[in-house]
Amino acid sequence: MSSLNRLALRSLPTLVAAQQSFSTGAAAFSSSYARSFSRSSTPLFIPSHISTHRQFNNHSAMRTYASTPSSQTPNGSDILASYSSDSHIGQDVAHAMEMLAKADAVCFDVDSTVIDEEGIDVLADTLGKGPEVTAWTTKAMDGNIKFEDALAARLEIIKPSKTDIANCLEKHPLRLSPGVDRLVEALHKRGTDVYLVSGGFRLMIEPVAEVLGVSFDRIYANTITFDESGDYTGFDSNEPTSADQGKPKALTMIKEKYGYKTMVMVGDGATDAQAKPPADAFVGFGGVVARAAVKEKACWFVHDFETMIDIVNKNSN
């Protein structure tokens, strides 16, 4: 799985000469990324919807319960009882499992959750600013500093241009976390809406969303601003995810706009834990980095997506 789990970035066009607005440039960038991926003669990542043989194969810790339509979702205690109880940790695992079983919307953090690294750290590393920026990222994800302060500090250190971002992704394509593609596919198949809610950068997230089949209007992330030459000028502080408590704000906006009844947040950081409420459950993800503060707050803390995939598949219409 891991050897297939890299997004191919080839034939990226030079972005420096673009005289378009940022939004147009970002769309063009993402479209080019996707075309490059589809042309790759040696695919490094195969979306699960075209896979002919991917199946969940970790049955050792599981018993079975009958697949149940979402309108007749079993209670969380029954779902939890169908799995080995000593393999699950969290403040209220049964509740989180039940919420996932009947969720009509699931929101994912991106860095260290959907992808197996922190995008801003990868970008900083390619610009020779890795250690300095990583220190700020750690503070932000552990909840030791306001997110907006960490975001501003990191961007001031690297000041990335459009060309810097393109070069970064070409040299170091972002990698999906194992299983996240199958989880998103299972949610979509069930009719559950998927959102990417991130403190990362829209320009780097849109290509990932395109591969996962998540529409761009379901991305809530930060927007870097550039001048007409593509040089960095700042970031849009009006984005809800640009500040501390931004993720609960974003989820509130989503829930109120679309009227979702049951929403689950999945992520690795302290800012993700803040999203419950309005999320009905928070699933902490420790498959990339296991943060003690997140584990303490999570309704359910997981190290991979396999049980989540199983629950979604067994509770589908």
Image (tube, helix red, strand yellow):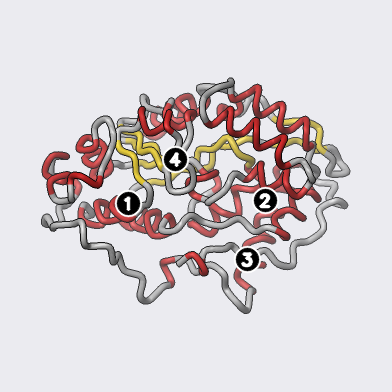
Instruction: Answer left or right for 141 relative to 273.
Output: right
Camera-nearest label, 3 or 2? 3
- Residue type at the position of mark 3: Ala
Q: Earlier in the sequence, mark 4 or mark 2?
A: 2
Categorize mark 4 by other alpha carbons within 10 Å: few (<14), some (14-19), many (20+): some
Camera-nearest label, 1 or 4? 4
Camera-nearest label, 1 or 3? 3
Cα distance between the residues tagged 1 and 3: 28 Å
Q: Are marks 4 and 2 in contact (CB under 8 Å)?
A: no
Q: Residue at x 55, y 47 (%)?
A: 216
Categorize mark 3 by other alpha carbons within 10 Å: few (<14), some (14-19), many (20+): many
Q: Quadrant of residue 169?
A: bottom right
Q: Earlier in the sequence, mark 3 or mark 2?
A: 3
Identify residue for label 2.
27
Instruction: Answer left or right for 170 relative to 303.
Output: right
Q: Is residue 53 above or below residue 217?
A: below
Q: Residue at x 20, y 38 (%)?
A: 94
Identify residue for label 3.
8
Identify residue for label 1.
191
